[in-house]
Amino acid sequence: MAREKYKTLTEQMFYILICLQQECCGIDIMEKVQSVTEKRVTIGPGTLYALLADFVKQGFIKETAVEGRKRSYIITPEGQQILDNEYRRLKTLVVDYEKTEKQ
Amino acid sequence: MKEKEKLIRNILVQYNCLGDLGRSFEEMAANGWMLEEISGRTKFIFRKCNPKKIYFSVNIFPEGSEYDTHPSEANLEYNEFCKNAGWDFVCSSGPIHVFVSENADAEIIDTDPVTELKSINRLMRPQMILNAVMAAFGITTIAYNLTINMYAFLMHFVVFMGVFIWGLAIILFAFKTSGYLLWYRRAKKAASEGEKLPEGKKTSFRTNMILLSLMFLVMSVLFIWAGKKFESQECFYMIPIFSAIFLVFFVSRKFLQFSEKKKIGRDGLKVITWVVLPVLTVVLINILIISLVINGVDDTDRKTDLISDTTVFAAENSDISRFEQKKWKFGSFILNQYNYTLSEYTDNKLSAEWNCQVYETRNSSAYRRIISDVKNGKIRIFGILFDFNRSVVPEGISHDGTEVYECKNVNDVGNYYEYLIYDSDTILRCGCKSELSQEQFDVICRDIVMR
């Protein structure tokens, strides 16, 4: 059921997983997403907190360190697979678009 | 005159109307009232301040529960995330957290409508399930009273009102559930398109209170009217019983506010106050109503002396005339129950008593149902099945044209004999602490059953 739900990812989900290919904490993720997307995509603290908690529950990411209230996470192989699937899906969309454009 | 420093507003928080709530706090702050704390579930306390233009964000803590009393480490972590985005924590109540910012461009706390909807739905689901369970229970109660327990429904105003109240409750549950489901459909569509979630329909605390008070008033008036009309004291007793429900909710709310203020108790206390206490109240009230309906309250003077086997009852010794006035004037729909107390006096002192109920109806379907049951030695009163078939047919007593069933109950007080007497179109159920003799049986058949 959970896999079904993550068949397609929202922009926020996608970027959080991208950032977590390297170990980082919540606040780092917010900053990283803004810089990667040049402020096109922003992740609100509420959304980030909810998604991190959900990803941990689903086993897509895991907690690596806790310093006070600062928690660091990293992506798991399962999470990486979800991210790769999404990447392939987006790539297919792009290829399809380009095919129709050429015609 | 001293200027008011504190302002209390009762607000009904709806998880799908949090945007409106934030805007109302902004208006209050612009008028010089800053939100300070939320006490209990609905009491919002504002403190006098200089009018200022500030921005509020009211959000659902994703891991929060309705029963959270004190902030946990997870809450503090969440608040820290928000602080980093420019939002200062103001106060919280259960899963609701209120943040404030002086910066109009502060990052929105919930940027993903899909996640936001999930948080709302997670909190609303138990409420919807509870509504569905209560509605199912109500529908079963109504169906039961309109079919199997129809006699009780037609006979007793309290049971009749019970069905009426359940009917109202089901409409309310259906209204609330369908309102949420319709909103959920719109919100899901908006979320899938990446749009902001729409605001739900707001119900004010005052409207809820007015509706509740109005319902209570109508019920009280109906019970007083029925109590006077049918000389049924049970109806009068229903008013303090229903008042008790409101009192329990009021006291539990005050208790919760007190415990939060004094920081006593843990989250479990909230579960006790919000779930255990109301459920216990409803169960106790139901037991009280059922026992009141079954036992009645007219028999306070009943004596427990045993009567001798030779006691003869005559109609003139009874208070039939008083009970004749209790005929219900609801046309052919309502089943009439005439209560007869046949008493014997020795030296001006009540020494013995028979209690009889005669059932009559002009409603053909109710009539057919009762007769078919009685022919099988059964009668169902207020949901209780009296199975006379399981008892023995009494020996030595008979009367032309009547069928009689006897049931002997043995309890701590002693033996209690119940009789079901059926004669073409009259049904009589009576009970006494001694066995019916032929002489007594003749009097009952002549004076009551065949009168």
Image (cartoon, coloured by chain):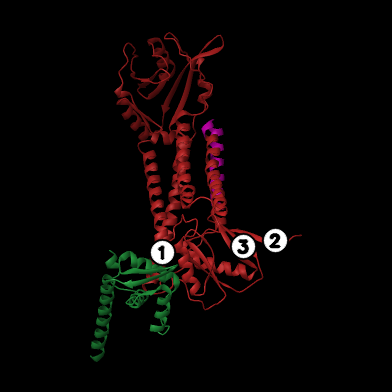
Q: Position of residue A86 (x, y in %)?
A: 28, 76
Tell which chain the image draws in red: B
* Label 1 or label 3, whichever comes before in sequence order: 3
Identify residue for label 3: B46
Q: Amino acid at mark 2?
A: Lys
Is residue B279 depicted above or below A78 in this figure? above
B345 or B17: nearer the eye?
A: B17
Chain at numbered mark 3: B
Residue drawn at (27%, 85%) of the image? A97
Label disc, if present, on residue B119 of the rendered structure: 1
Can residue B93 be found in the magenta stretch?
A: no
- Whether tag 3 and tag 2 are in contact, CB under 8 A, the answer is no
Most frequent secondary structure within the magenta stretch: helix
Q: Which residues are magenta?
A: B210-234
Tell me which chain the residue with mark 2 is part of. B
Q: Please tell me which residue is depicted at 51% across the width and 62% down the height of the picture.
A: B202
Q: What amino acid is labelled 3 in the image?
A: Phe
| Residue underneath mark 2 | B4
Work out how far the residue at label 3 is from the one at label 2, CA to CA, in angstroms: 11 Å
Residue at the spot 29% in from the left edge and 26% down from the top edge: B376
**Residue B115 placement (x, y as % from top left):** 39, 68
Element assignment for label 1: helix
State if disc 2 and disc 1 touch (CB < 8 Å).
no
At horizontal 63% and vertical 73% (from top left) the residue drawn is B52
Chain green in the figure, letter: A
